[in-house]
Amino acid sequence: MTYSKVETFNIDGCKVRVHFPDLPEEERAKRKNALMKAAERFLKHAERVKKEKAEQENMPEAKEG
């Protein structure tokens, strides 16, 4: 695989070099699609966790008696 673009970032005192691969359009589209699906799954999970947390906070606690 060839890399024609390299960017360097300085993050919290660390030097990070990111190499961008040269990809055919078909492979680029495939990877973008996989990224979009992963983002969708992540956001759906985050919303589900948020909803479950809100439901738990609104539940009346069981009273011992």
Image: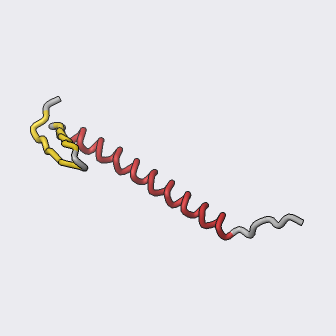
The single residue placed furthest to the top in the displayed view is 1
The single residue placed furthest to the right in the displayed view is 65
Q: Residue at x 71, y 68 (%)?
A: 59
Q: Is residue 14 above or below residue 50?
A: above
Q: Where the C terminus falls, by quadrant? A: bottom right
Query: Which residue is more in the foreground, 26 or 48?
Result: 48
User: Left or right of 57: which side holds 36?
Assistant: left
Q: Where the N terminus falls, by quadrant? A: top left
Query: Which residue is more in the foreground, 2 or 52?
Result: 52
The image position of residue 34, as x and y in percent, is 35, 44
Q: Quadrant of residue 20?
A: top left
Query: Which residue is more in the foreground, 25 or 32?
Result: 32
User: Left or right of 25: which side holds 54?
Assistant: right
The image position of residue 36, as x and y in percent, is 35, 51
The image position of residue 44, as x and y in percent, is 49, 56
Q: Quadrant of residue 14?
A: top left
Q: Residue at x 45, y 52 (%)?
A: 42
